[in-house]
């Protein structure tokens, strides 16, 4: 019995040590968790000001401020600071007048040419393929919504013509 209590106590003590770790949501998990997904350029790192080059999901102003963009619990050498003129693919949620990356700095991927650096992957991703993959589900969703709207309109028209008989 003492061993069980001791093991339980050790688990409770060890749990907070893992509180700052993040699980990999995967690309589409990040997209789903985001209000907006953008390819953006860092304009001013000291003000956390970012300029949107391409909005892949959601409505976002041309420029906005980032908040909570660095994991404050990470050791300094592992913190992903903003770099002037750097391009990033960002998965963001709206926070008042600003935007915060999903999972702090892990919602930001550095763009290097046509490659993306993802904190959860050892090898880089291809930017073009990643963008195509992000846009595909939203296009499919739009087509599904349009099909559903068309079907609902058809049903309404059918029920209206039956009620007029």
Image (cartoon, rainbow, N blue to C red):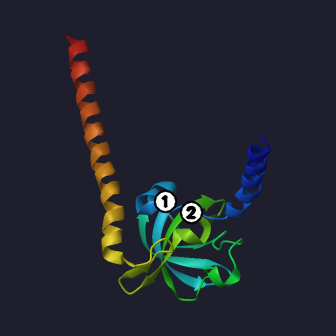
Count of marks, rendered view: 2
Quarter of the rendering containing residue 97: bottom right
Label 1 CA crowd tier, 10 Å (few <14, some 14–19, many 20+): some
In this view, 49 is above or below 56: below
Please say if the residues under marks 1 and 2 sit with CB atoms less than 8 Å apart.
Answer: yes
Q: Which mark is residue 102?
A: 2
Q: Quadrant of the C terminus?
A: top left
Quarter of the rendering containing residue 139: bottom left
Label 2 CA crowd tier, 10 Å (few <14, some 14–19, many 20+): many
Residue 141, percent across and down? 33, 49
Residue 130, percent across and down? 35, 70
In this view, 150 is above or below 104: above
For marks 1 and 2, give the one nearer the viewer: 1
Q: Secondary structure at mark 2?
A: loop
Residue ID at (62%, 64%):
21
Q: Secondary structure at mark 1?
A: loop
In this view, 154 is above or below 160: below
Q: Is residue 56 left or right of residue 129?
A: right
Q: Is residue 116 left or right of residue 77?
A: left
Which of marks 2 and 1 precedes in the sequence?
1
Q: Which mark is residue 90?
A: none
Task: State the separation of the CA atoms marked 1 and 2.
Answer: 10 Å
Q: Which mark is residue 25?
A: 1
Q: Quadrant of the N terminus?
A: top right
Residue 113, percent across and down? 38, 87
In this view, 17 is above or below 9: below
């Amino acid at each position: 019995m003492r061993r069980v209590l001791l093991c339980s106590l050790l688990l409770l003590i060890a749990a907070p040590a893992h509180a700052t770790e993040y699980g990999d949501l995967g690309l589409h998990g990040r997209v789903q968790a985001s209000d907006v997904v953008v390819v953006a350029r860092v304009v001013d790192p000291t003000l956390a000001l970012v300029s949107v080059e391409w909005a892949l999901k959601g409505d976002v102003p041309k420029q906005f401020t980032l908040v909570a963009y660095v994991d404050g619990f990470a050791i300094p050498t592992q913190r992903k600071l903003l770099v002037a003129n750097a391009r990033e693919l960002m998965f963001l949620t709206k926070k008042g007048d600003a935007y915060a990356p999903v999972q702090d700095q892990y919602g930001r991927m550095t763009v290097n040419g046509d490659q993306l650096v993802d904190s959860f992957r050892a090898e880089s991703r291809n930017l073009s393929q990643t963008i195509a993959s992000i846009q595909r589900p939203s296009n499919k969703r739009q087509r599904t919504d349009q099909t559903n709207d068309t079907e609902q309109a058809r049903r309404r028209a059918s029920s209206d013509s039956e009620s007029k008989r």
